[in-house]
Image (cartoon, rainbow, N blue to C red):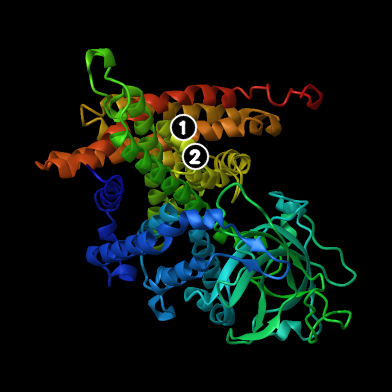
Amino acid sequence: MTDPSRNRRSTLSFMLYDWLDAASLTSRPRYAEHSRETFDALLEASERIARERFAPFNRLVDVEEPRFDGDRVHLPAVARAALQAYAESGLLAAGHDAADGGMQLPYLVDMAANSFFAAASVGLSGYPMLTYASCNLLMAHGTDAQKRAFAQQQMSARFTGTMCLSEPQAGSSLADVATRALPDGADSQAEPLGPRFRLEGSKMWISAGEHELAENIVHLVLARISPPGEAPTPGVKGLSLFIVPRVLVDAEGHPTGERNDVALAGVNHKLGYRGTVNTLLSFGEGRYPVRPPGGLDGRGAGAIGYLVGGPGEGLRLMFHMMNEARLNVGMGAAMLGLAGYEVAVDYARVRTQGRPLGTGTRDDGAAPVPIISHPDVRRMLLAQKAYAEGALALCLYGARLVDERRTGTAEARREAGLLLELLTPVAKSWPSQWCLEANSLAIQVLGGYGYTRDFPVEQYWRDNRLNMIHEGTHGIQALDLLGRKILGDGGAALRLWAGRVGETVRRARERATLRPHADALATAVGAIEEAVRTLSAHQPRQHVLANAGDFLQAFGHVVVAWIWLDVACAAEARLAGETGGAQLDPLRGTLQAARYFLRFELPKVGAWLEVARTCDPTYREMPDAWF
């Protein structure tokens, strides 16, 4: 019997090397010390650590969810061991300069290595994922002192990180953030760790916000600077970004032992993703008053925070972390989809039930067959594979754009930046929706057993359900995609993307087996372009954006159809030069998943796109009284 998880590694290698040509990155100065051998060694080590230190405890951290005793949060001991094993692998510093203790790995290889942890235990992997993103933000935008005191401590997991945006009354509406930051006395601007402020307010839905897994927690907090006697700047332009450590540190990052005024107000009890504690935090409520220096009232009121960048730059800087987190959310969703698919395939191969159509009945003495023999089960398995591997390919392509933006030629960097901006909302939202559907289909394949906790597929569904919500809901991603990324830039990114699709279509048309799919994709892209032209001329704007969710559905499916057609070209090229047998079955399966998506999923685009193109009024003309 073929091991589905081994097929995953084979598929990942094909996508990295045959499709995205990861090995060619070693010709660039930044990655010159690496080779395919070093990439493979990292992938093998990551797979092993995920298998040994994360996967065995995925159910444990789900059942023994975080508990708050009024003083501290309790987590299973395995959570600390898992985080430490991850840190010892070097992955927390993987993408950073060698001079800073990093590996200077391509982001593509880095993301591929981290995919194993998301599949093994997405809850446990939340701590390193957030810490990695926090560290990256500070290494990109912090001062040398901030990098030394906070970012470099996160590379070793001595400190972990969070992002603190949402508030109880604001949710995703960052323009309504009310947390305020007051200058901390006359000497605050001379603080070696950056201008010092006192923060007061509450932050909700903060993953990894309180725990005992590390010496310290570095909270990156959006707040409004409120000088005495002045009203803060309203809207998102008034937001600034602050480093707020749970425990105060000296100029070198050594904890002083004094608790900052950051208090846990409560733990949120989640449907899934329970391995990552989720919290309500209160800043400056006075539970841990920090004594002078500081405090305009002389009592040390407020949590100490250090300004990152300049005043009013908070949202721009936070987007560095948010966009990276969105790619990681998409990858996490993809790997949960794959994990469920692998269980479903394994189950379908050993579970016997029914007889093949037209071959006899039990009364005839016909033996029951594995359910994978039944066409409807194969339909569900193939859909799961198409959704999950398509999502994996989409996220890996996004990671490849990150590398191009960082190390390519000037023109390549510009184009990669445009494409990455356009595709990030899709890379977050599409895997979150369709890999959740994959998990639902995995439950269906297992039948009644799938609905029980005796099998892991119900947990994969519960864990994946969060991905449609956090780091920006589907509605937020849809408004961002249509309002900002497509209509807001005059169509430059869309034209560039359409040109890339055109290149794939031309290559696919050279292959008789792919020509019909290439033609169908070209037609779908033309429909997208025509819809955008219509919407660009349509007024008022609120009518255009009312159906942004439908446009996101359509555009996302066309993007993934393009990704699948591009993957199919690479798969056919690889198979044409091979004469092997069973070892090529995973690649043949990937090619069949591409055919499935292009044949069965791409045709769904028309209905969604028509609703968006015509600014259908059904949603907006429904009065609240009718609900």
Viewer-proximal residue among 356 and 259: 356
Residue located beneath label 2 in the image: 452
Which residue is labeled 1 in the image? 448
Residue 32 position within the rendered picture, expressed as x and y whole percent measured from the top left: 28, 70
In this rendering, would 29 be left or right of 298? Answer: left
Residue type at the position of mark 2: Thr
Residue shown at 29%/52% (left/top)?
9
Q: Are marks 2 and 1 in contact (CB under 8 Å)?
A: yes
Q: Quadrant of residue 361?
A: top left
Say whether residue 23 is left or right of residue 622.
left
* Residue 136 as seen in the image, left or right of residue 541: left
Q: Position of residue 179 (x, y in %)?
A: 77, 62
Q: Position of residue 187 (x, y in %)?
A: 77, 86
Give how far apart the Cα atoms at labels 2 and 1 are.
Answer: 7 Å
Give neighbour class at mark 2: few <14, some 14-19, many 20+ (Cα, 10 Å): some
Q: Which mark is residue 22?
A: none
- The amino acid type of the residue labelled 1 equals Gly
**What is the residue that sits farthest to the left in this orientation?**
579
299 versus 125 height, above or below: below
